[in-house]
Amino acid sequence: MSEPAPRIDPTSPADGETTPAPLTRGRRIDLFRAIPGLGWLAKRRSFQFWVVLPNLFLFLLFLTAGIAGTPVGNRNIIIVFVWILWWFLLISLLVPFVSRIWCTVCPFPFFGEWAQRRALIKVRAVAPKDRKSGPGVVIGRNRYFGLNLKWPKRLSNIWIQNIGFLFLCTFAALFLTRPIVSVVVLGSLFVIATTLHLIYRQRAFCSYVCPVSGFLSLYSMSSTVEVRAKDAGVCDKCKDKGCLAGSEKGWGCPWYVYPSKLDRNNYCGLCMECVKTCPSDNITVNARPFCSDRLLKGWDEAWKAFIMLSLALAYSVTFLGPWGFIKDWANVAEKQDWAGFATYTAILWATALVIVPGIYAAAVGLGRFIVRKVPGAALPFKDVFLGFVYPLVPLGLLTWIAFSLPLILVNGSYIAMVISDPFGFGWDLFGTANMHWTPVVPEWTPYIQVVLLLGGLFFALRVGFAHATRLYRETRVALRAFLPVGCLLGVFVGSLIFLYAA
Amino acid sequence: MLEQEVDYLFCDWCRKHVPCHRVPSGGWEVDCPGCAGECVRCDCYLRRYCFANRGDFPPLRKVEGDPK
Amino acid sequence: MRVRATRVLLAVAVLGAFGTAGFVLAPAVEAPKERSFTVRAHRYGYEPERMRVNRGDRVRLKLESKDVVHGFFLEGHDLDATIVPLRAAVEFRRPSRPGVREEVAEVNFTAEHEGKFRYRCSQTCGFLHPFMQGELVVGPNRLLPVALALVLGMLVAGFFLARFPARRA
């Protein structure tokens, strides 16, 4: 075992099984080179602290406003800033263009990580001779505090995030409109994050529990930036592995990823620790084409795509549709229509977990059936299914943007109002508290939504064709196998267009 | 096909054997093409303690049908 | 490179053809006429939830509230009304002329532009106020057939033209 084993070519099958090739491709621009000062900034130890701190104060301000401020949602900063402004920025700009940058600035893990590290900025590096002595737990070359248990293997996936997000979203009509419910939701996440940091090592909460993290992981695959090794050869020869084990310059990757081998954005929280710890300065941030990561790796990720798509559809009906009775079903705390709420919940959960995946699986199955007699086309269902579910990543993201756009266009003027009166106490700090509610070009909404949905369909078909060709090699076979799924995507987009424009 | 003289680790996530080799730092590195770079998913591609506790090597699991 | 350029051009041509077909084949609308609706606002919706008229129609709206004070802001038509329960008249304003308000028995306007316009509550009326809305669809609303035709065109272009390089090869 002293000799190195031959490395596997990641694009070739191992053990005689079909291992999908990474579909990461396209040009890369090293942003540390292209943007002067960016690399320097990312290497500052205090970088993350200074970007989280203002967010933490804002978050505490929001919680205070939610508890002490007006119960009228559109007059309270927690509702307007979190669910109108933050949500729009997150889904429409941050995720597509800057990947999981929200995780870089997120305040939820602040206290938990502080307790784990007993440091806000500095690093606790451990010399080899001191590994067995001293307080806390040594992981890699860093010392941590708290229990630092390993996260259970059975839960090492995003199912908790899937179900947690769906559960939360079932009550969206409550927390989107009631400040105190938003406080309960956000406050609970804050407490859970802190508690889990004390029990499990590093970012277990972010990786496996945080409901926001789940869809960030999925849609960050389409993002136009990535953290990657500059030169894989340098990493192969690296004796230090500081990105993983940590060093005196930084902590080992808190997200349990191995940056030098990373080929997807899903589980990289852009904390920039690997940029600091790499002894060869071999980690950078690249700009890249939209939808560069193209491989879903498990059922949990596929179901995340189904859940997100179903929620976008359900919310479009509930919140953007004209049907008051559906709003009444969702708005159970006020209308007390428990039978209606049960119906709403049952439809939502069945659609997200069973109906949409079922229809999709049937389309994938039909595609496999069509090409069943072609020699070599009998591929494992899971491989084909995961490949053909991937188009839901760009399509889902664009659908969510199409859903979120009217929220900001119509309700954006509330932002100016609550800036002047964040608690709804009757203040007028900047003279904008009493301005009239003014939607911005709301009549353009259907046109913009149609363009976004058509764009989503374009990207979905494009990446779907790429997956089909990767799986089936021959273009004609690939297109026939993908035909049912392609048509299904068309039907979905057509239905949404009907909803938005009819 | 598993090769002679190469140690393997069974990846629970990918349900396959992946080679495991010693790296110059003294630890062991697991090469799983299915979860490249994402210990977060399968915990096998690069078992963190390979490098954290130098010299430790990943436990090899026997599974039915394995070559001896 | 030539194959790629040809494919893009063909795709644009196919999409253009489908889009044009959708535009041309949109159902024709009747001659303009006068249409009257009584719109009843309640938390959190309107009855009727959707009104259909044609471009050029003169629309007369009688607005009522079944519970609390509501608003009626019609997108793209520069009109906003405040509806008070148990009152026949509504307070009418044009958002482009802030400060000018008048009491009117009916809100009248001509549907000059086709498309879908939402009417929304403009007076905070409760928890789901920001989502309280109805829809005015002004025919021929060609966005819909054009968009659906483009979806079809995209599928046709995608599935047929993706084979193009393979055939050439």
Image: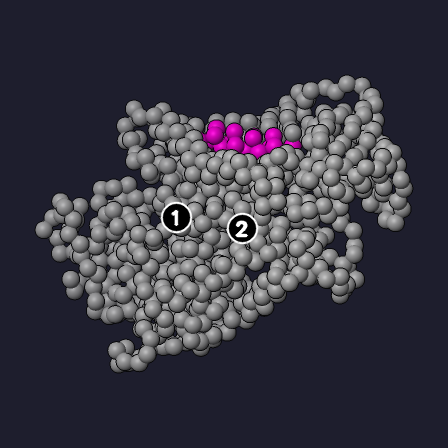
- Place of residue A314 in the rendered image (x, y in percent of width and height, measured from the top left): 54, 38
Q: Secondary structure at mark 2?
A: helix
Q: Is residue A298 left or right of residue C91?
A: left
User: In the image, which disc is placed on residue A159?
Assistant: 1
Please report, as a chain letter, where disc 2 is located: A
Q: Is residue A209 left or right of residue A417?
A: left
Q: Which residues are magenta?
A: A485-501
- Place of residue C63 in the rendered image (x, y in percent of width and height, measured from the top left): 80, 34
Q: Residue at the spot x=82%, y=31% of the render?
A: C62
- Place of residue A336 in the rendered image (x, y in percent of width and height, measured from the top left): 58, 41
First in sequence: mark 2 or mark 1? 2
Tell me the quarter of the picture where residue C43 sits.
top right
Please report, as a chain letter, where disc 1 is located: A
Question: Is C143 above or below relative to A167?
Answer: above
Distance from the alpha carbon under mark 2 to that under mark 1: 23 Å
Q: Is residue A269 left or right of residue C38?
A: left
Name the amino acid, label 1. Trp
User: In the image, which disc is placed on residue A96?
Assistant: 2
- Report the residue that reaches farthest toward the left: B68
- Of residues A221 and A147, the one nearer the viewer is A147
Tell me the quarter of the picture where residue A71 sits.
bottom right
- Of residues A76 and A438, the one nearer the viewer is A76
